[in-house]
Amino acid sequence: MDDASRRRSPRRILIVDDAGLVRRFHRDALEKAGFAVVEALNGVEALEKILAEPFDMAVVDVNMPQMDGLTFLTALRDLEGPERSLPALIVSTEAAAHDREAARAAGANFYLVKPVRPDLLVEHVMLMCGGAR
């Protein structure tokens, strides 16, 4: 995809969560707001998708099998290419201050605690990646 086509197409958001209900909830809210959404079940799958195609942002859970969200973010930030700077929003049930600090240390740009209202999710995604286009 060339730069002009990319500017006209919707922002691409990667949702990384092992819970199908959560992925669907996030997908519905973001698609209604005009975003294109791709899903990954864990950090391993997310890294594979990010290396295969461009995204504008990732919405990431913390607790997942195979590779959790914090390990995923650390691996993402260690990449050599432009993917390493992909904005990442953590959406987790973990609400303690040390959880937020750990996410920030791993490379999260922002942190929300589940359950998240759809309008709040969309607002943060729009702020972090510049809107749906």
Image (cartoon, rainbow, N blue to C red):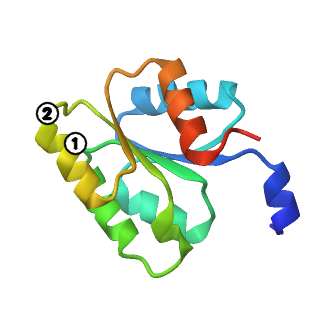
Residue occupying the point 18% across, 51% down: 102
Whether residue 125 is situated above or below residue 44 in the rendered picture: above
Quarter of the view holding residue 75: bottom left
- Placement of 9 over or under 126, stated as above or below: below
Rendering coords of residue 8 (x, y %): 85, 50
Other residues around mark 2 within 10 Å, as few (<14) / some (14–19) / many (≥20): few
Tell me the quarter of the picture where residue 73 sits. Answer: bottom left
**Of the numbered discs in the image, which one, if any, rests on residue 96?**
2
Tag 1 residue: 100
Q: Is residue 66 visible?
A: no
Percent across and percent down for residue 93 are 24, 30
Which residue shows up at 68% across the image and 24% down it?
32
Question: 75 or 48, which lies in front?
Answer: 75
The CA span between labels 1 and 2 is 7 Å
Q: Amino acid at mark 2?
A: Ala
Q: Is residue 111 rendered to the left or right of residue 36?
A: left
The correct choice, above or below, for 71 with respect to 125 in the image is: below
Which quarter of the rendered picture does the C terminus lie within?
A: top right
Disc 1 residue type? Arg
Is 116 positioned to the left or the right of 50 in the image?
Answer: left
| The one of 93 and 97 positioned closer to us in this rendering | 97
Rendered residue at 65%/44% (across/down) = 130
**As displayed, is residue 25 above or below residue 70?**
above
Quadrant (top left, top right, bottom left, bottom right) of the N terminus: bottom right
Q: x%, y% of residue 84?
A: 46, 69
> Which numbered circle lies on residue 133?
none
Residue 3, horizontal then vertical, whole percent: 82, 66
